[in-house]
């Protein structure tokens, strides 16, 4: 038996334990209901427990990244998160019982009512608390799917670049990132997001990777939408870690390579200038700035296809802008070794699609993995902007960290 199979069996056993333990809270409440109805409720609970574990087994052998996979994994996640919340209260009740038995030495003291009337036992109170706690993640995540997935926000940033040529003063740049077209379930909403972008009339548009989840064919039905993205100075793009087909099994190396070629053709078909370890010049009148685009380069386990030395070679202009999907690239290579890069656009993190943003306060679990996980980071006159992403991956929604279209205005005057 393979090591991965052993771990999968252990996971199934752990989920079974969660189901049994959470059943304690449900059964405490069932006892207060008429026996016939309680009998059916117990059957319903046991049925959903079997169904959840069966879904886990089914997804073990399913293709990841599809719309159906994302919804099913979200249902499973919500179910077990809710049960884990409930288990906390059941565990508290179990500890209370053990302490009561230890000190009283008499099991009859367990759940003894303090007084007659409307007061309930501690076990019943904790069981009801467990049910309330269990509903919170379900309600929150459901709201994130229904309301957050396509709640596109325009974010505006004015960036001061002291060496910016006068011809580019006031230029409007737009950034999209992490479209993940294989996750979409509302095409009309996607059209609305792109219309929102084009209403800004940007001079140039950048896309910083992850057009799909696994396969290039995921974007096929969205060609007509993304082809609407136009700008006088052009639309420029790079690849993200999901665009190479690294997260699925292919029938052959040739099939995987063909998928990458299809990805390159997809960018071309949409009218996007895909930059793969190369640079070009953006020109306004007699002024120019350099635009550098690298393939995906990520710290740790993420693929390092990017070659910044090659991309940077012979780049010209008083200002240099880098498109690189993963923000970890900034600390790892860009800041230490390429002091002439003034501005880097990235994405990748999605802000984990979960967090809190109130005014200038931002928090997300993403910060535990990425020092730069959302919005603008500045050191001296060097800037990194991390886009929160246009789409979503895994969980088909967003809670607190909403999908983003970013509009930048460049200026050579201090802000």
Image: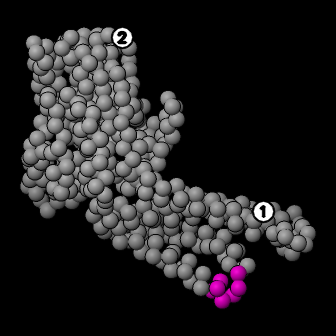
Residue 187 falls left or right of residue 101: left
**Residue lying at 26% horizontally and 44% vertically, measured from the top left:** 194
The image's mark for residue 96 is 1
Real-space Cα distance between discs 1 and 2? Answer: 63 Å
Quarter of the picture containing the C terminus is: top left
Q: Position of residue 176 (x, y in %)?
A: 27, 38
> Residue at the location (52% across, 63% down)?
80
Residue 148 numbered mark, or none: none
Residue ID at (14%, 62%): 251
Give the residue displayed 39% in from the left and 25% down from the top. Answer: 377
Front tag of 1 and 2: 2
Give whichever of 79, 362 is nearer the camera: 362
Residue 414: mark = 2
Q: What range of the chain is rendered magenta? A: 33-39
- Circles 1 and 2 in contact, beta carbons < 8 Å: no
Q: Quadrant of residue 309?
A: top left
Precedes in sequence: disc 1 or disc 2: 1
Q: How is the image coloured?
A: one colour
**Which residue is at the front of the view, 329 or 35?**
35
Chief SS of the magenta region: helix
Q: Position of residue 362 (x, y in %)?
A: 49, 34
């Amino acid at each position: 038996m393979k090591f991965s199979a052993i771990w999968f069996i252990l996971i199934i056993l752990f989920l079974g334990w969660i189901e049994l333990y959470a059943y304690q809270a449900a059964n405490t409440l069932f006892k207060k209901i008429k026996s016939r109805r309680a009998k059916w409720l117990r059957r319903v609970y046991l049925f959903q427990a079997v169904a959840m574990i069966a879904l886990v087994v089914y997804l073990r052998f399913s293709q990841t990244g599809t719309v159906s996979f994302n919804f099913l994994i979200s249902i499973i996640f919500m179910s077990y998160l809710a049960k884990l919340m409930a288990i906390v209260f059941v565990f508290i009740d179990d500890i209370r019982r053990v302490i009561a038995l230890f000190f009283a030495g008499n099991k009859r003291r367990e759940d003894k009512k303090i007084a007659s009337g409307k007061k309930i036992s501690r076990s019943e109170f904790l069981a009801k608390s467990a049910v309330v706690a269990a509903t919170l993640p379900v309600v929150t995540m459901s709201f994130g799917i229904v309301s957050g997935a396509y709640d596109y926000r325009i974010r505006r940033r004015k960036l001061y670049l002291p060496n910016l040529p006068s011809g580019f003063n006031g230029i409007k740049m737009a950034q999209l990132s992490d479209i993940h077209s294989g996750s979409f379930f509302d095409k009309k909403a996607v059209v609305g997001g792109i219309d929102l972008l084009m209403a800004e009339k940007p001079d140039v548009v950048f896309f910083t990777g992850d057009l799909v989840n696994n396969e290039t064919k995921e974007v096929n039905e969205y060609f007509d939408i993304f082809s609407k993205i136009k700008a006088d100075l052009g639309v420029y793009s790079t690849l993200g870690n999901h665009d190479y087909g690294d997260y699925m099994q292919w029938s052959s190396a040739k099939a995987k390579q063909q998928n990458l070629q299809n990805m390159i053709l997809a960018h071309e078909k949409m009218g996007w200038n895909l930059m793969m370890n190369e640079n070009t010049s953006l020109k306004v009148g007699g002024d120019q700035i350099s635009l550098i685009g690298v393939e995906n380069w990520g710290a740790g386990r993420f693929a390092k296809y990017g070659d910044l030395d090659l991309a940077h070679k012979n780049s010209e202009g008083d200002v240099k802008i880098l498109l690189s999907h993963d923000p970890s690239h900034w600390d790892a290579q860009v800041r230490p070794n390429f002091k002439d890069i003034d501005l880097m656009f990235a994405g990748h993190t999605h802000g984990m699609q979960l967090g809190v943003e109130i005014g200038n306060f931002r928090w997300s679990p993403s910060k535990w993995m990425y020092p730069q996980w959302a919005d603008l980071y500045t050191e001296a006159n060097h800037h990194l902007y991390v886009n929160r992403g246009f789409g979503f991956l895994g969980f088909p929604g967003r809670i607190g960290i909403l999908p983003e279209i970013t509009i930048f205005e460049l200026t050579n005057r201090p802000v």
